[in-house]
Image: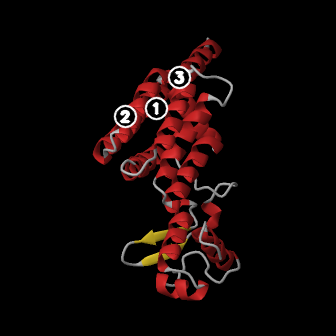
């Protein structure tokens, strides 16, 4: 097996064992050492493969206990786990803040120039190359690539797939992004400035601030949606009440 994407190959081999029934839902996978010996790879490759499988919702890693197979019936049709917008945004805040911190000391000037180009597209100053939403995705995935860590790249790419491929999440995020589009450029520029300074702490803080604002916007949108639903139900109840009064006359 070639070194590039080695963990991906290991993950596929583990999935074959799971799907064939060797490791049914609820069972514990062999330890990292045993799997490394079985597949003739390093324990690091096994660990990265298990992290990737956990991101897909196929296994759950319990610290101090091991990795356990999950019921694939809980997966969406595209193989991604079913998550809500708050759950996904919290996960993205955690992973992407640390991704930015890890990338900061080692990111190249070319990568920074690439990020600045994506901001130009998001702001609307450059058109035709891709949509603002595509540039947003490319921006975050470019930072993940700058870490040179394939497990981080896989996890962040998977979370972006959840964001863009799940219809419910796509609708919620579009509503929030359209409402707060003015913040997008400033927040992404703050991340780039921290990366330019090669400052891990500032990069982490800038990325967290981006997601904190997004979570606040999601909360506000959720509250408005809940209020609208209460008004709708009240209107329906009022209509039924008035109809009943008319029938009683």
Cα gap from disc 2 to disc 1, whole angstroms: 32 Å
Q: x, y (%) of residue 114?
A: 53, 37
Q: Is residue 152 visible?
A: yes
Provide the residue designation for mark 2. Answer: 193
Which dot marks residue 123? 3
Cα gap from disc 2 to disc 3, whole angstroms: 16 Å
Which dot marks residue 90? none
Cα gap from disc 1 to disc 3, whole angstroms: 26 Å
129 horizontally vs 242: left or right: right
Provide the residue designation for mark 1. Answer: 222
**Is the residue under label 3 in contact with that under label 1 (CB below 8 Å)?**
no
Judge by depth and name the residue closer to the eye, 102 or 213: 102
Q: Dot 3 lies on which element?
A: helix
Judge by depth and name the residue closer to the eye, 238 or 153: 153
- The crowd level at tag 1 (other Cα within 10 Å; few <14, some 14-19, many 20+) is few
Q: Nearer the viewer, mark 2 or mark 3?
A: 2
**Is the residue under label 3 in contact with that under label 2 (CB below 8 Å)?**
no
Q: Dot 1 lies on which element?
A: helix
* Point 48% across, 46% down: residue: 143
Q: Dot 2 lies on which element?
A: helix
Q: x, y (%) of residue 56?
A: 58, 60
- The crowd level at tag 2 (other Cα within 10 Å; few <14, some 14-19, many 20+) is some
Q: Is residue 195 above or below residue 120?
A: below
- The crowd level at tag 3 (other Cα within 10 Å; few <14, some 14-19, many 20+) is some
18 horizontally vs 189: left or right: right
């Amino acid at each position: 097996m070639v070194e590039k994407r080695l963990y991906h190959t290991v993950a596929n081999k583990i999935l074959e064992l799971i799907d064939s029934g060797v490791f049914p839902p609820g069972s514990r996978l062999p330890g990292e050492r045993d799997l490394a010996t079985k597949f003739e790879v390093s324990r690091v490759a096994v660990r990265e493969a298990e992290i990737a499988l956990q991101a897909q919702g196929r296994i759950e890693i319990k610290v101090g206990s091991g990795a356990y197979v999950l019921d694939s019936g809980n997966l969406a049709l595209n193989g991604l786990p079913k998550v809500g917008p708050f759950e996904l945004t919290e996960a993205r805040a955690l992973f992407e803040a640390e991704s930015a911190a890890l990338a900061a000391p080692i990111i190249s000037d070319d990568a920074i120039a690439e990020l600045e180009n994506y901001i130009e597209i998001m702001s609307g100053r450059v058109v035709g190359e891709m949509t603002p939403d595509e540039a947003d995705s490319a921006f975050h995935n470019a930072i993940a690539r700058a870490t040179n860590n394939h497990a981080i790249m896989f996890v962040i790419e998977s979370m972006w797939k959840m964001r863009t491929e799940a219809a419910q999440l796509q609708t919620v995020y579009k509503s929030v992004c359209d409402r707060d589009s003015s913040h997008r450029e400033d927040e992404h520029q703050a991340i780039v400035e921290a990366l330019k300074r090669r400052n891990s702490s500032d990069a982490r803080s800038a990325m967290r601030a981006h997601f904190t604002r997004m979570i606040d916007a999601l909360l506000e949108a959720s509250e408005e949606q809940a209020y609208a639903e209460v008004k709708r139900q009240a209107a329906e109840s009022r209509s039924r009440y008035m109809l009943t009064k008319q029938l009683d006359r």
